[in-house]
Amino acid sequence: QVQLVESGGGLVQPGGSLRLSCAASGSIKMIYVMGWYRQAPGKQRELVAGIFSGGSTNYADSVKGRFTISRDNAKNTVYLQMNSLKLEDTAVYSCTAEVWAVDNTRRHYWGQGTQVTVSS
C-alpha cells in the first residue's frame, strides 16, 4: 500500500507564491512519474505539471514560466513552486504518482488534495 500526503496549500493574494509538497510512503520500489493535477469548481480536472524519475518535466501552458515542479527521489517527494499566482489558479491541487511497488504491481496513487485559494 502506498500513501501520498500533500501539504502547503492555503490562501494567497494575486502575485504571491506558495509551495506544495507531496510525500509518498509505503511499499515503494520505484516511482516513475509524479505530478500535480488541479480542479476548480465547475471545471474538469487538469494536469498542472509532471516530472519523471529522470528529471524531465512537462507543464500546462497556463502555468509555464510561473510554476516549477521538482522532486527528491531519495525522499519520494515532489514539490510544486507556484509564483505569480493568479485568481484562476484557485483550485484543489492533488498529487499523483505512478508507483512500482515491492509486490511488483504498478499503479497510480492519488493524494487527498489541498486547497489553493488566490484572492485579494
Image (cartoon, rainbow, N blue to C red):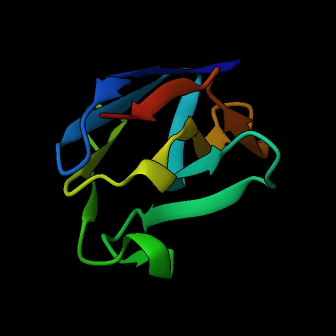
Quadrant in the picture for the C terminus:
top left
Horizontal relation, residue 26 to residue 22: left or right:
right
Q: Which residue shows up at 46% across the image and 74% down it?
A: 62
Q: Position of residue 55 (x, y in %)?
A: 30, 70
Horizontal relation, residue 109 to residue 38: left or right:
right
Quadrant in the picture for the N terminus:
top right
Q: Position of residue 102 (x, y in %)?
A: 64, 32
Horizontal relation, residue 11 to residue 106: left or right:
left
Q: Nearer the viewer, residue 98 or 95?
A: 95
Note whether residue 72 is visible. no
Which residue in the rendered view is the most extreme toward the bottom?
Answer: 61
Q: Nearer the viewer, residue 3 or 62?
A: 62
Q: Position of residue 20 (x, y in %)?
A: 32, 34
Q: Which residue shows up at 68% across the image and 33% down it?
A: 110
| Picture quadrant where residue 16 is located | top left
Against 64, residue 48 (above or below) is above
| Picture quadrant where residue 72 is located | top left
Q: Position of residue 64 (x, y in %)?
A: 34, 77
Q: Nearer the viewer, residue 113 or 115?
A: 115
Note whether residue 86 is visible. yes
